[in-house]
C-alpha cells in the first residue's frame, strides 16, 4: 500500500526533532555561564540533569547532581555544572526513595511549581555560582538554586 507523502514528511520531521537535543537560550549554555567573570554572580543555565558518575554522595541536607549540555551518560570530558538539591518533597527539592546507592528511579525532583522531573530531563536553574579554575577546566557549582524549571 502506498502511503501519502505527508505521512513520510511528518515521520521524518519527528525523527529529526527527536535527535536534535537541547539548545540553550542565549547566555544559558554551561560553557558561557561557568566562567571566572561570573564567579559569585547570579546566572541561569540549562541542560540535562545527570547523576554523578559513580556514587551520588548525599549530605545531610542535600545531594549534588550534574547539569550537562549533552544527554549521554555522565562523564568527565565536557563542561558541566554541579547543582545541589535540598532533600524534601517541596519545590526545588529532591525526594529519595532509597538512600543506599539510589538509581534514577529512586529520585524524584520538583521544580518551582512542584512539577516532577527526573535525571535525563532538561531543566533551567538560576542562582549564584562558584567557579574555581583547576588548570584545564573550571569547576562550577550552584549550591542553592533560587529557581528550577523543567523545560
Image: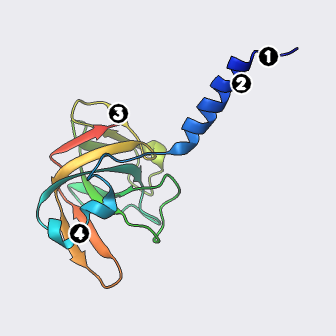
> Reading the chain from its start, which is encountered first: label 3 or label 2?
2
Residue with the mark numbered 2: 8
Q: How crowded is mark 1: few (under 14 residues within 10 Å), some or many (20 or more)?
A: few
Q: Where is residue 117 in the image (x, y as percent from the top left)?
A: 37, 37
User: SS class of the residue under badge 1?
Assistant: loop
Q: How many labels does the image show?
A: 4
User: SS class of the residue under badge 2?
Assistant: helix
Cα separation between marks 1 and 3: 39 Å
Which quadrant of the figure has residue 2? Answer: top right
Q: How crowded is mark 2: few (under 14 residues within 10 Å), some or many (20 or more)?
A: few
Snapshot colouring? rainbow
**In this rendering, the label closer to the viewer, 3 or 4:** 4
Residue with the mark numbered 4: 35
Residue with the mark numbered 3: 116
Cα separation between marks 2 and 1: 8 Å
> Reading the chain from its start, which is encountered first: label 2 or label 1?
1
Asked whether the beta carbons under mark 2 and mark 1 sit within 8 Å of each other, the answer is: yes
47 left or right, relative to 138: right
User: SS class of the residue under badge 4?
Assistant: loop
81 left or right, relative to 50: left
Amino acid at each position: 500500500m502506498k502511503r501519502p507523502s505527508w505521512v513520510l514528511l511528518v515521520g521524518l520531521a519527528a525523527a529529526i526533532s527527536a535527535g536534535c537535543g537541547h539548545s540553550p537560550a542565549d547566555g544559558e549554555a554551561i560553557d558561557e555561564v561557568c566562567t571566572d567573570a561570573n564567579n559569585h554572580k547570579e546566572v541561569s543555565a540549562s541542560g540535562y540533569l545527570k547523576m554523578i558518575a559513580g556514587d551520588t554522595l548525599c549530605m545531610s541536607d542535600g545531594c549534588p547532581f550534574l547539569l550537562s549540555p549533552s544527554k549521554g551518560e555522565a562523564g568527565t570530558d565536557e563542561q558541566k555544572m554541579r547543582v545541589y538539591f535540598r532533600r524534601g518533597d517541596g519545590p526545588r527539592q529532591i525526594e529519595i526513595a532509597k538512600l543506599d546507592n539510589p538509581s534514577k528511579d529512586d529520585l524524584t525532583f520538583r521544580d518551582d511549581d512542584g512539577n516532577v522531573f527526573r535525571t535525563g530531563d532538561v531543566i533551567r536553574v538560576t542562582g549564584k555560582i562558584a567557579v574555581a579554575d583547576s588548570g584545564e577546566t573550571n569547576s562550577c557549582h550552584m549550591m542553592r538554586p533560587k529557581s528550577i524549571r523543567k523545560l
